[in-house]
Amino acid sequence: MSSCVGIIGGGLTGLTAAYRLVKKGVSVTVFEQAAEPGGLAASMDLGTVSLERFYHHIFTSDKHLLDLCRELGLDSLVGWFEPRNAIFIDNRLYPFTSPMDLLRFTPMSLASRIRTGLLTLASRFVRDYKPFESQTAKDWLIKRAGEQSYRKVWEPLLASKFDRDADLVSAVWIWNKFKLRGASRGRNINREKLGYMKGGFAQLISKLSEEITEAGGIIRLNCPISGIRCLPDGGFSLDGCPDGEKFDRVLFTGSPQQLAALDTPLDAGQRRMMSELKAKANLCLNLELDRPLSDYYWITVAQRDIPFVLIIEHTNLVGMDNYPSHVVYLSRYVDQQDAIWQKSDHEIEAIFLDGLSRVFPGFDRAWIKRSTLSRAPYAQPVITRHYSRLVPSIKTAVDGLYLASMAQIYPEDRGMNYAVRLGTTVADEILREL
């Protein structure tokens, strides 16, 4: 097959699509603006292991990712762990792992605890999300779990996750969260299992990249693309492509907003529809400490006066093997227009560390061996009501131009499993048309 496909974006979706295409004899070139592939799954070196810049784990239900790991011979590297979780509320940490923890959660009345537990349990068995599309998460949670449950727990969490758009978020989004976490418990609702790859998910990114290049594909790093142009005799050229190559098909794997901002043949109506979709940026501070903060893996922060929504102690899940430090992530979602997004890395780190001292009054900055702040401008699509009407098609109105982004995996939320699924889906679509 002599066709040539240009893929803009070397994240997991773009790499999966490239891998599927080169294995079918398609000539593929991947363009990644960063110095390393991986996108939101990109990593940094941490002693003898790699560590993702943004926190990652997988679920037992992540079939597409696990199948790809088996195909690449990496399945033996995937380990399964039982996390201990907590919630920080009213300036105190409460265990929040099992149904019994919920029953003991005294910030809410017993009736609210029972209603919340029944809601999360029932969500696991719901298959048809369409009835939730017309409801906001706020209205759905108040109706199903009660006003107190919403005000104490869900309202601050939604505000921390979606900022000024919290009241617009669809019930489908929160239902899917309940469903996914429930599925990770299997038949035993008291025990959750989360997966992680020994040595980091950089192993997966590296193996995919290796398979692509060995099959004749090309991956160009530090190569941003600023425009996509239709050629008079058919096909495309890319502004920023160093060799002036021509492509029969082009796949864009960034956000719809990023595609709308490029110099492309999309018409004004298409650009408007894509640019009007909402997404939140993410600020993720990684701390390498000389000691743990707690014995919890995942701490949800349900207080608006704390500048992050999650504290994730990675090494409390996977253990300290090969890790030279205790690894902690502090994560916040924010509008790109928000004042904190405009601040310097140093200023953001200072704000986050002040917040960490609120959660852990004994925390000492002398414990920090190294800190790294990572930014992602389009980290979390905002799923609003009737989102199924807004999801962009994989095939754009420009013949031969495709879009594959996290905004298109609805009703599921972002995750590596769905990035792999989407990469395979768009590769199949391209192969059908070539």
Image: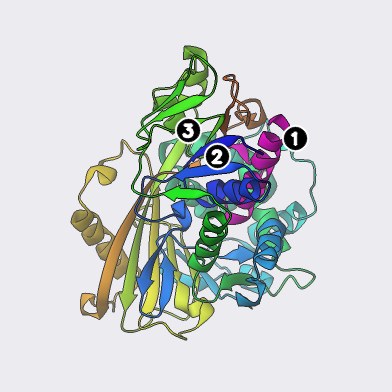
> Which numbered tag is attached to residue 333?
none
The spot of residue 133 in percent (x, y) is 68, 33
Identify residue for label 3.
Answer: 278
Q: Give the dominant element type of the magenta stretch: helix, strand or loop.
A: helix
Q: Nearer the viewer, mark 1 or mark 3?
A: 3
Please report the residue visible at 49 percent of the width from the left and 52 percent of the height from the top.
157
Front tag of 2 and 1: 2
Helix or strand or loop: what does disc 3 sit on? loop
- Residue drawn at (35%, 81%) of the image: 325
Compared to residue 285, the image places residue 334 above or below, namely above
Residue at which label 2 appears: 405
Using the rendered image of the protein, determine whether residue 368 is visible from the camera's viewpoint: yes
Using the image, determine if residue 434 lies above or below residue 253: above
Q: Is residue 59 left or right of residue 162?
A: right
Label ID, residue 130: 1
Q: Quadrant of the C terminus?
A: top right
- Which of the two labelled residues, at mark 2 and mark 3, occupies the earlier sequence position? 3
Callout 1, which amino acid?
Lys
Residue 60: say if magenta: no
First in sequence: mark 1 or mark 3? 1
Point out the tag, 2 or 1, that comes first from the N-terminus: 1
Whole-Å distance between the Cαs marked 2 and 3?
Answer: 13 Å
Q: Which residues are magenta?
A: 406-434
In the structure shown, which secondary structural element does the residue marked by tag 2 occupy?
A: loop
Measure the alpha-carbon separation of dots 2 and 1: 22 Å
Determine if the magenta segment contains residue 411: yes
Dot 3 crowding, Cα within 10 Å, few <14, some 14–19, many 20+: some
Asked whether the residues under the numbered discs 1 and 3 touch, taking CB atoms below 8 Å apart as contact, a structural biologist would say no
Q: Is residue 382 visible?
A: no
Amino acid at dot 3: Lys
